Image (cartoon, grey):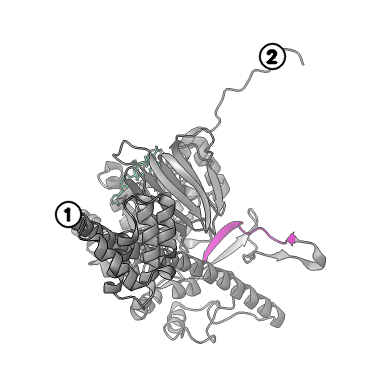
Amino acid sequence: MEKKERRNLGSRLGLSVISPAFSPEELMQESSDVAANGSPNGTENGRLETFGSSASTLSSSDSIKAAYAYLPQTPIRSTDAHLIEFSEAMRTVAKALRRVAEGKAAAQAEAAEWKRKYELEKARNLQHKNEELEHEGCPCCMNGTLEDSLNKLTVHDASSDQNECCGNHGICSHQVLGDEAPAPIVNSAYKMVARKASFRLSWGCNGEKNGQHKHDVVSFEKGDITTASRSNKQILLKWETQPQTVFIITKPNSSEVRAIMPEMVRWLNEHQKINVLVEPRLREELLADDSYFDFVQTWEDDDDKKLLHTKVDLVVTLGGDGTVLWAASLFKGPVPPVVAFALGSLGFMTPFHSEQYRESLGNVIKGPFSITLRNRLQCQVIRDAAKDELETEEPILVLNEVTIDRGISSYLTYLECYCDSSFVTCVQGDGLIISTTSGSTAYSLAAGGSMVHPQVPAILFTPICPHSLSFRPLILPEYVTLRVQVPYNSRGQAWASFDGKDRKQLAPGDALICSMAPWPVPTACLVDSTTDFLRSIHEGLHWNLRKSQSFDGPPA
Ligand SMILES: NC(=O)c1ccc[n+]([C@@H]2O[C@H](COP(=O)([O-])OP(=O)(O)OC[C@H]3O[C@@H](n4cnc5c(N)ncnc54)[C@H](O)[C@@H]3O)[C@@H](O)[C@H]2O)c1
Ligand SMILES: Nc1ncnc2c1ncn2[C@@H]1O[C@H](COP(=O)(O)OP(=O)(O)OP(=O)(O)O)[C@@H](O)[C@H]1O
């Protein structure tokens, strides 16, 4: 039976299968009915009509009779056909379930977005309310001892509004951390939250530390639409309690890193009285050199690792951009502020100079300091072969990009792309990059995408070597959900890789869903977001470097 016919049969069976009124035996009967009634010599249109209307026009006894009439003529081929039809039906069931799972992933992304909007709205309303009442502060935001804060945190009851932050002083870290702690470990997470330093974020104009709250205000009074404030200004992070735990992440096998690391750990411990946490590999390396480092902490198992964000106040990276990507990948949820020291070649995301680590870390630990909130993409692979919606794979968060390419296949990739429910295009070429704005200066740039300031709320859609003259890269708003589907008629497989790692094969029928994750990576700025970004494109890429023309040219 031809592919197209099988697909029509599939969609008919797919509808039947998700109805609970049909048992597997009935399904088999359905498929054999269709197989029997589709004449081997019939025209395509004829078959289409048969399939499209069989439920209403054929009684099951007619079908059985037809099947019996057909079977004796070609007993072996008929049995084969029967099996093919049955496996097609099962494939269709799998497809229907996959669609349900895709719907679920999109709904989860949408729910996260609504939650974010709700939090913003809630904070705004609270601020208005508090301004009216000339409220002076709330227990959460008032200065107090660490002991006071711990007591308040441990008695915090999520269902009560009593201890809620007034929102007067920016977004309070207690709220963010409390809200995003993974559900099954609420109790232990709360215990750990109590040990974390609290901070607040404020949005202001360049250099103006006015503590302005983030508002996405669009006023439409008297029919005139005006925006009262831009959504993203330079963000400042101010500690409310002293940070206590620093997590140091280093590039492996680097002599430069090995030279600076023990010195930094010693300084943090002795001069700043700060706990130091490292990856297990690094702790072993430190202890092998000197038993002094016995106080350095690490984690023991994956459960501990999942709780890192509840324990760590600050992340320090020693390496290049790859080390920042690695650091981000260790946090599957909220990420503490990251201070990235440049010990690599390019250093787009590593603005701090390692020789000046005492001064830089001292300033950050004291605060306030500017941060860039770098959005991450949440990517989920949905397998065609998944038997049910529970079989979806763990989502992967990327700071740069997810790439879907042809891997070792020598065929063009053939990818169908959708944005929310709209069809975008088919990518025929080497592949596609779905990038964050932070990733815009990485692989996407190499494939011809624009460089975008990391604070712009956008998703980049950049083809890799498209075999078409008119396929320009797109920049889409950050709230969309993208779906990249490997169609059934694709010649080859495709491969997805996440920040250049974790390659996953995508077979025909598999899909990848991407949306903005609710957990950005806050990176500390050396100066501010814009100055750091421009410095990195000037110094890292020598952007638009050209010798100036001399003054003594032809007369005007
Ligand atoms: N043709 C290409 O340009 C190409 C090909 C594959 C991967 N990559 C990039 O490499 C990244 C993985 O980095 P890695 O260090 O683990 O691999 P790596 O060691 O191969 O280094 C890749 C290079 O990309 C640079 N880079 C990484 N993130 C950047 C960013 N946000 N802005 C500017 N430059 C950036 C790094 O500094 C490094 O020089 C991927 O996320 C991808 O963006 C680029
Ligand atoms: N803590 C870590 N554990 C395992 N791998 C890591 C770790 N830190 C970094 N890496 C990996 O090591 C590789 C090199 O790191 P990184 O990019 O920081 O250094 P680089 O290549 O010298 O610098 P640049 O990217 O600026 O050229 C990256 O692929 C990164 O994923």
Q: Name the residue beneath numbered marker 2.
A: 552
- Please name whichever residue, 158 or 481, is drawn nearer the observer in this view of the structure: 481
Q: For the residue marked with disc 1, what is the amino acid? A: Ala
Which residue range is magenta in the image? 226-239
Secondary structure beneath dot 2 equals loop
**Residues packed near mark 2 inside 10 Å, few (<14), some (14 to 19) or many (20 plus):** few
Q: Residues within 10 Å of mark 1 (few under 14, many from 20)?
A: few
In-image side of 117 versus 20 (left or right): right
In terms of sequence position, does the residue under pointer 2 or pointer 1 come before the other?
1
Which disc number belongs to residue 288? 1
> Which residue is located at x 40 percent, y 73 percent?
181
Q: Is mark 1 within 8 Å of ligand 2?
A: no
Task: Say whether residue 238 is magenta.
Answer: yes
Residue 356: image x %, image y %?
Answer: 42, 47
Q: Residue at x 28, y 45 (%)?
A: 259
In-front residue for pair 191/2? 2
In the displayed structure image, the side of residue 49 where residue 63 appears, left or right: left
**Element at badge 1?**
helix
Q: Are marks 2 and 1 in contact (CB under 8 Å)?
A: no
Closer to the camera, 84 or 237?
84
Q: Within the image, what quadrant is residue 336 found in?
A: bottom left
Q: Is residue 189 magenta?
A: no
Which residue is at a point 54% across and 85% down the rendered structure image? 161
Q: Quadrant of residue 5?
A: bottom left
Of badges 2 and 1, nearer the viewer stands 2
- Compute the Cα span from label 2 to label 1: 65 Å
| Residue type beneath disc 2 | Asp
